[in-house]
């Protein structure tokens, strides 16, 4: 990445002039803070004492045995306070907001986990919080909506466009443009304008750093493959960060294949997109021939996004990481498998990564190791899974 936030042709800051100054202010504050030992110390203390890190690695013994090939192990971000990896990033950004003297937090959310994590740190730091969420996601992620309200956040249901994550982010950006003097926009994924992709990766890299050390301690070796779901891509870039300099570890990002790539009803931006600009950054984007953003679809609200973080695009182009789609049916089957074999209810987003590990494991030797980032827990998805099964049982 260069100093302007470009990863090859991707990234950068393509924003209106009204946002250029707030982004410059944010970048200066972030680069100063990350060199400040006291900032890093407080961040790490909160991850330990409030979030409950480090998160463990769990070997899926029964599932691996049933598949008959490689061992599947999980990096358990679902065990964090709030139930997902999102809180790693919101802790860091809230500390930065306080350092900058901002008095209000706003956020976008799809599956609701980033909204819950932002509402959580807002309560912890005594700051008012507003969360923008697509109206469709408000409906299908009702448990997380109630959690956010309980934590004191105001929920703004967005009805424009497809009423999902893309539209929620549009509205949050509009709010920030209007209120940037006192408001800090907590972006939840490794996308958006510079410095957000770098900043989110920094705060999420704890996943990969822990995982690398834990694998060496637990298995005496690194994994053969590190696998994570990719919507915008924050949990994946956090996991990949720990193994980027280990060429023996294959990095695998798993996109939302929805009803199949050929159907056009999916959210696989790298697999099915082409370069464009979305939410202030150049990225791989699902769009029409005229450059209009295409409405996406996935059974998982958190992956239902038409773009992806710019570093993922660069990793794909350079061949350091590969990106593959998993469709709804495969993700729901993996959701069921992890429940039945291991007693772990995964988020539907994470289930895409589990499904890819299930697909790969049987063809690999028994001494191979697949490390999957279990980015969140699935309490929020019970109704979505029930509805999916009811709608598809007779097809």
Image (tube, rainbow, N blue to C red):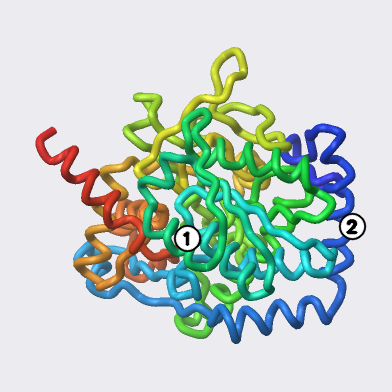
Label 2, residues with CA under 10 Å away: few <14, some 14-19, many ≥20: few
In terms of depth relative to the viewer, which is nearer, 314 or 295? 295
Q: Residue at x 27, y 75 (%)?
A: 61
Tag 1's secondary structure? strand
Q: Quadrant of residue 316?
A: top right
x, y percentage for residue 342? Answer: 26, 72
Q: Is residue 350 above or below residue 343?
A: above
Report the side of 61 relative to 16 (left or right).
left
Please name the residue that numbered disc 1 is placed on: 225
For marks 2 and 1 on the same chain, the one whose residue lies earlier in the sequence: 2
* In front: label 2 or label 1: 2
Tag 2's secondary structure? helix
Circle number at residue 62: none
Report the side of 170 relative to 99 (left or right).
left
In terms of depth relative to the viewer, which is nearer, 351 or 30? 30
Task: Report the quarter where the C terminus lies.
Answer: top left
Report the side of 301 relative to 103 (left or right).
left
Q: Residue at x 61, y 69 (%)?
A: 88
Question: Which residue lies most toward the top here?
Answer: 290
Circle number at residue 28: 2
Q: Is residue 329 above or below residue 41?
A: above
User: Does residue 373 appear in the picture of this structure?
Assistant: no
Q: Residue at x 67, y 47 (%)?
A: 311
User: Does residue 185 appear in the picture of this structure?
Assistant: yes
x, y percentage for residue 227? Answer: 46, 57
Q: Quadrant of residue 368?
A: bottom left
Question: Which residue lies most toward the left here?
Answer: 394
x, y percentage for residue 383? Answer: 27, 53
Label 1, residues with CA under 10 Å away: few <14, some 14-19, many ≥20: some
x, y percentage for residue 380? Answer: 36, 59
């Amino acid at each position: 990445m260069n100093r302007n936030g470009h990863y090859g042709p991707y990234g950068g800051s393509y924003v209106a002039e009204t946002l250029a100054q707030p982004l410059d202010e944010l970048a200066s504050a972030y680069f100063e803070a990350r060199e400040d030992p006291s900032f890093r110390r407080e961040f790490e203390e909160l991850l330990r004492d409030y979030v409950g890190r480090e998160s463990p690695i769990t070997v899926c013994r029964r599932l691996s045995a049933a598949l008959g090939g490689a061992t599947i192990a999980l990096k358990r971000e679902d065990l964090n306070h709030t139930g997902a990896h999102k809180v790693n990033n919101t802790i860091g950004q809230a500390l930065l907001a306080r350092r900058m003297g901002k008095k209000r937090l706003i956020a976008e959310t799809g599956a609701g986990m980033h909204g819950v994590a932002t509402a959580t740190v807002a309560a912890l730091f005594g700051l008012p919080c507003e969360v923008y969420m697509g109206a469709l996601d408000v409906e299908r992620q009702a448990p997380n909506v109630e959690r956010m309200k309980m934590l004191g956040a105001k929920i703004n249901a967005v009805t424009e466009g497809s009423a999902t994550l893309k539209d929620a982010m549009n509205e949050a950006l509009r709010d920030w443009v209007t209120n940037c003097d006192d408001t800090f926009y907590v972006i939840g994924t490794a996308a958006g304008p510079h410095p957000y992709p770098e900043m989110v990766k920094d705060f999420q890299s704890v996943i990969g750093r822990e995982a690398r050390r834990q694998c060496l301690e637990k298995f005496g070796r690194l994994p053969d493959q590190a696998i994570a779901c990719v919507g915008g891509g924050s949990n994946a870039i956090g996991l990949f960060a720990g193994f980027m300099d280990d060429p023996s570890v294959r990095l695998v990002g798993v996109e939302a294949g929805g009803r199949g790539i050929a159907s056009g009803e999916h959210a696989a931006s790298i697999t099915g997109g082409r370069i464009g600009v979305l939410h202030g950054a150049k990225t791989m984007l699902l769009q029409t021939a005229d450059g209009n953003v295409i409405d996406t679809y996935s059974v998982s609200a958190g992956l239902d996004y038409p773009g992806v973080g710019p570093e993922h695009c660069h990793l794909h182009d350079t061949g350091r990481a590969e990106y593959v789609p998993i469709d709804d049916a495969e993700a729901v089957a993996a959701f069921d498998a992890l429940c039945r074999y291991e007693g772990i209810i995964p988020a539907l987003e994470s289930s895409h990564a589990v499904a890819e590990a299930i697909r790969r494991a049987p063809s690999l030797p028994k001494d191979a190791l697949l490390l999957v980032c279990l980015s969140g827990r699935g309490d929020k998805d019970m109704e979505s899974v029930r509805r999916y099964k009811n709608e598809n049982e007779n097809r």
